[in-house]
Amino acid sequence: MQSSMRSVLSFLDAPQLNSPEGYIAFKPEIFDAESTVSDSGTADFLGHYMSEFSAFVARVLDASAEGRIGDADPVEAP
C-alpha cells in the first residue's frame, strides 16, 4: 500500500518525506508500564524521525524554512 501511495503522490507532485523511513513492529517489551518507550535505541530513532518530520512540515509550509534532511538537528539547522 505504501509503495502505491508514493506513486500516486509523486504523480500529483505532492511533497513526501522519503527519508528516513520507519517500520516499527509492536513489541510489548519496548514499552514500560506508563506506555513510555523504554528501549533507548527505539526512543532515539523515534526522536530523530519526529525531528525530521517536524523539519519537513516546516519546509512544506514555508519554502524558506531552515533545515535539510540529514542535518544533525534539522529543526535548528543554521
Image (spheres, rainbow, N blue to C red):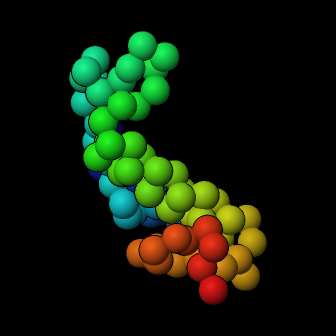
Residue located 54% across and 71% down the image: 74
Lateral position of residue 69 relative to residue 39, left or right: right
Residue 58 appears in which quarter of the rendering? bottom right
Q: Please determine whether, in this image, residue 61 is positioned above or below residue 37.
A: below
Residue located 45% across and 74% down the image: 72
Lateral position of residue 15 relative to residue 59, left or right: left
Residue located 49% across and 16% down the image: 34
Can residue 10 be seen by looking at this rendering?
A: yes
Position in image of residue 50 (x %, y %) = 51, 51
Position in image of residue 2 (x %, y %) = 34, 44
Q: Please determine whether, in this image, residue 29 is positioned above or below residue 39.
A: above
Query: So how many labels did they put on this image?
Result: 0
Q: In the depicted view, which residue is nearer to us: 34 or 50?
A: 34
Q: In the depicted view, which residue is nearer to us: 45 or 39?
A: 39
Position in image of residue 51 (x %, y %) = 53, 58
Q: In the depicted view, which residue is nearer to us: 44 or 13?
A: 44
Work out which quarter of the rendered image holds the N terminus and state it: top left
Lateral position of residue 8 relative to residue 25, left or right: right
Can residue 2 be seen by looking at this rendering?
A: no
Residue located 75% across and 72% down the image: 62
Q: Residue furthest bottom?
A: 78
Work out which quarter of the rendered image holds the C terminus and state it: bottom right
Q: Please determine whether, in this image, residue 29 is positioned above or below residue 56.
A: above
Q: In the depicted view, which residue is nearer to us: 23 or 41?
A: 41
